[in-house]
């Protein structure tokens, strides 16, 4: 729906003022807050038009207007086109991603904490592109009780898995060297798609440790189907203080794992938002490596969120992660 420049300015003011102090917008308050060269009567006409279009609504017949879900969506979509990253979280993000010895789940948790602290809203990170992680090394170590521990180094930290198989130190070392030599720098998906061909071409060379490799591949196949979810919900307490109803709506979503995955598991390539009347709102962003999605970050809250601050925090984190994790 095309809006005139004046209508867009008025709608932006309505949303921003309501976010800031919950104040419904009136023609008089628009006049006070803008340099628009028009009368109060003209502004009243514009507000009526925005209401008729579904962007604003009146809570009371004689009262001012407040944004609708459609109004919030229009505001956010236009705001996201020009959002700029701030440097507030940059140092924390760099420290996090430079520590490549961390477990993947710890890094995911760290990302969620940084965003949640920066925005003061609950934050969820979904790793939904494990097949796109870039492999860096394999370390397979025999354990007691006929088990082995596999450490898989990726560009997003280590993934660990335990194998129920007995293997000698030599076979574990050979399997580690084999997998690292042929798949370092490739994605997890490439390994899964090509491992059988590599094994067939090297049958004699790997026969001694093939059972170790086979078990690693089985474990990776299971891992590829998983979606790693991390929820940081401590800031819900702040929402409770502001509005118990808003907090209940957000908590209901945060406690529904399938809904979180449904909301975040998308193929969008930039920051976006979901704003509905009957659900909590979310501003989300993908983490891309080489143009392929590895994870998604979502900040959840009521409709009346500070979308600009949230989008700015997401942008700096996503840009930094995407820039530094492509190697």
Image: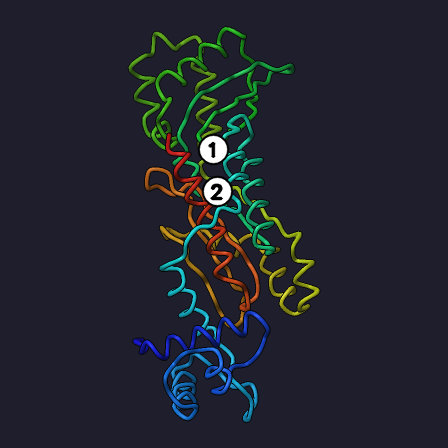
Q: Secondary structure at mark 1?
A: loop
- Give 170 or 106, whichever is nearer the viewer: 106
Write the residue at 53% across / 74% down: 17
- Residue mark closest to the camera, 1 vs 2: 1
Write the residue at 66% across / 69% down: 243
- Where the C terminus falls, by quadrant? top left
Please give the residue where the numbered disc 1 appears in the rendered image.
156
Quarter location, residue 7: bottom left
Q: Disc 1 versus disc 2: distance between alpha carbons?
A: 10 Å
Residue 168 placement (x, y as % from top left): 54, 8
Q: Residues within 10 Å of mark 2 (few under 14, many from 20)?
A: many
Please give the residue where the numbered disc 2 appears in the rendered image.
127
Using the image, determine if residue 44 lies above or below residue 251.
below
Quarter location, residue 76: bottom left
Residue 285 placement (x, y as % from top left): 44, 51
Q: Secondary structure at mark 2?
A: strand
1 and 2 marks in contact (CB < 8 Å): yes
- Give 110 or 82, whichever is nearer the viewer: 82
Work out whether mark 1 precedes mark 2 in sequence or the reverse, and give the earlier one: 2
Q: Is residue 70 visible?
A: no
């Amino acid at each position: 729906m095309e809006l005139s420049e004046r209508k867009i300015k008025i709608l932006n003011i309505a949303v921003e003022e309501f976010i800031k102090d919950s104040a419904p917008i009136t023609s008089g308050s628009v006049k006070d807050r803008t340099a628009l060269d028009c009368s109060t009567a003209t502004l009243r006409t514009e507000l009526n038009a925005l209401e008729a279009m579904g962007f604003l609504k009146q809570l009371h017949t004689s009262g001012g207007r407040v944004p609708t879900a459609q109004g919030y969506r229009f505001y956010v979509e236009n705001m996201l086109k020009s959002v700029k990253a701030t440097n507030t979280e940059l140092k924390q993000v760099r420290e996090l991603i430079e520590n490549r010895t961390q477990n993947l789940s710890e890094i995911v948790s760290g990302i969620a904490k940084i965003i949640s602290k920066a925005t003061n809203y609950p934050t969820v990170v979904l790793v939904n592109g494990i097949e796109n992680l870039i492999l860096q090394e394999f370390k397979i170590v025999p354990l007691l009780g006929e088990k082995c521990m596999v450490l898989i180094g990726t560009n997003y930290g280590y993934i660990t898995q335990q194998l129920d198989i007995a293997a000698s130190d030599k076979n574990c070392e050979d399997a580690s060297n084999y997998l690292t030599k042929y798949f370092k720098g490739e994605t997890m998906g490439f390994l899964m798609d090509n491992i059988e061909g590599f094994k067939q071409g090297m049958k004699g060379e790997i026969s001694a440790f093939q059972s170790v490799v086979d078990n690693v591949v089985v474990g990776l196949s299971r891992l590829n189907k998983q979606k790693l979810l991390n929820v940081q919900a401590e800031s819900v307490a702040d929402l409770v203080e502001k509005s118990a109803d808003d907090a209940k709506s957000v908590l209901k979503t945060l406690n529904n794992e399938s809904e979180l995955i449904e909301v975040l598991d998308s193929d969008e390539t930039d920051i976006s938002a979901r704003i509905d009347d009957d659900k909590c709102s979310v501003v989300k962003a993908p983490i891309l490596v080489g143009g392929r999605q590895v994870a998604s970050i979502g900040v959840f809250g009521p409709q009346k969120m500070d979308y600009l601050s949230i989008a700015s925090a997401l942008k700096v984190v996503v840009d930094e992660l995407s820039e530094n994790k492509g190697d």
